[in-house]
Image (cartoon, rainbow, N blue to C red):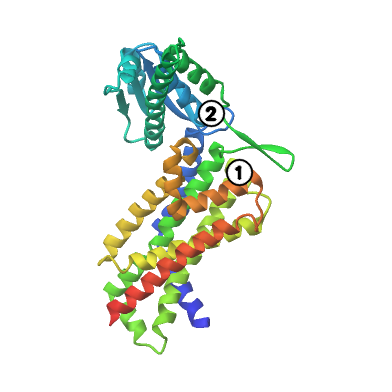
Amino acid sequence: MRKLLVIAWTDARIEFSERSTLLYFFILPMIFMVVLSFAFSTGDGQVTFPLLLVDEDRSSLSALVRAHLEQRGGVQVLLVPDRVQGEQRFEQGNAPMLVVIPAGFGERLRAGETVEVGVRVDERDNRAIALRQALQAALAVAQQSARIAQAGADFARDFGASLDERDILAEIGQRLADAPLRVHTTVAGRATPDMLNASQQSAAGQLVTWGLITFLTASSVLLYEQEAGTLARLFATPTSRALVLGGKVLSRFLMGVIQMAILVLFGWLALGVDWGRSPLALAAVLMAFGFMGVSVGVALATVVRTAQAASALSTFLSMVLAALGGAWWPLEITPEMYQRAAQVLPTAWAMRAFEAIFLRGAGLLDVLPEVGGLLAFGVVFLALGVWRLRALSD
């Protein structure tokens, strides 16, 4: 045990001897946390994703698209009178996406024809990815509603009744528009929103993103040691290989846990984020997430050849997993099918645990399913990594 801690401490001390380490471990995550908290926030602190909309069609189906977008929590539809003003406001950076519904949209959709909707996207803004998914869902609703309305009108005519499909679409649109913008659930006698506010989303999301980068770079550390020959020299000592590798991984795990703990403290002090009523629940989620992260890092070390490649892949993979798992935007604004598919990602389990802690005041027992899921991911990847390491060393 003592040797394990000595190896871990030595690695951590070497890592933090470089001043640039402080930048990537603490300063950049804190900057991103603050900037994104304000960038995604409305006046009431809720997460917002502004979308410029030009409705040239002004039909019941185009109104349905708008109603569906507005009904999805987090999407703020900014109506613009015409295409020219829409282009101007988009160029000024008023929103990461401009949508133009062309004249004839409703008629062509009811006729079952293909309709092209004008879309401009600022690819530099991560919110555009979520907005694109929200738009696709809204257009799909409009298309299905057109088919339902047509079928309903035909069915009514078969029985000699007079029912205009436009009336059906108007009723669908009205009911959707009347739906609450944000669903509330009642827990222990108090109403709570079902979506994180801007500060909570930013704090938890950046913690997941940067923590995962730290954990996954266990792969580059192992490969760098191998390239430098220090790993072979350590293996030549009386210390077992398992103890050496365990110390390296433990070092990265502890650094990541410390990083997340400092980000939790920063989120509380700088953004006023309330991290829930149960420190044990929060600690369990952080530890399970850390175990999962370093396990993926160990597995990653067995599929790349150089430390440089491992470092680049670790950062890229962390960003992708964080974005797709709901760390960069709420999964609630994405289509339901995508929300279900995202549950195969460990980052989605982590964000679900944070939502339970933030929104429902979850305790340790309440987050055990998410903690268990993260541990299961970790066990699978660690077993895969150890098996691969043994196969490569034979």
Q: Regarding mark 1 in the picture, which secondary structure is present there?
A: loop
Residue 301 x %, y %: 33, 67
> Residue at (57%, 32%) from the top-left corner?
45
Q: Is residue 369 above or below residue 351?
A: below
Where in the figure is residue 17, as x and y percent of width and height? 42, 65
According to the picture, the residue beneath numbered tag 2 turns out to be 42
Mark 1 crowd level (few <14, some 14–19, many ≥20, 10 Å Cα):
many
Q: Amino acid at mark 1?
A: Val
Mark 1 and mark 2: span between their CA atoms? 16 Å
Q: Position of residue 51 (x, y in %)?
A: 41, 25
The reply to whether discs 1 and 2 touch (Cβ–Cβ < 8 Å) is no
Residue receiving disc 1: 273
Q: Nearer the viewer, residue 130 or 264?
A: 130
Residue 16 placement, left or right of 101: right
Total numbered badges shown on the rendered structure: 2
Give the residue type at disc 2: Thr
Task: Name the spot of residue 135 as percent of width and height, x first.
Answer: 39, 29
**What is the residue that sits farthest to the right in this orientation?**
189
- Depth order, front residue of 211/379: 379
Instruction: Say which residue appears at 28% left-offset and 82% top-offset.
Output: 394
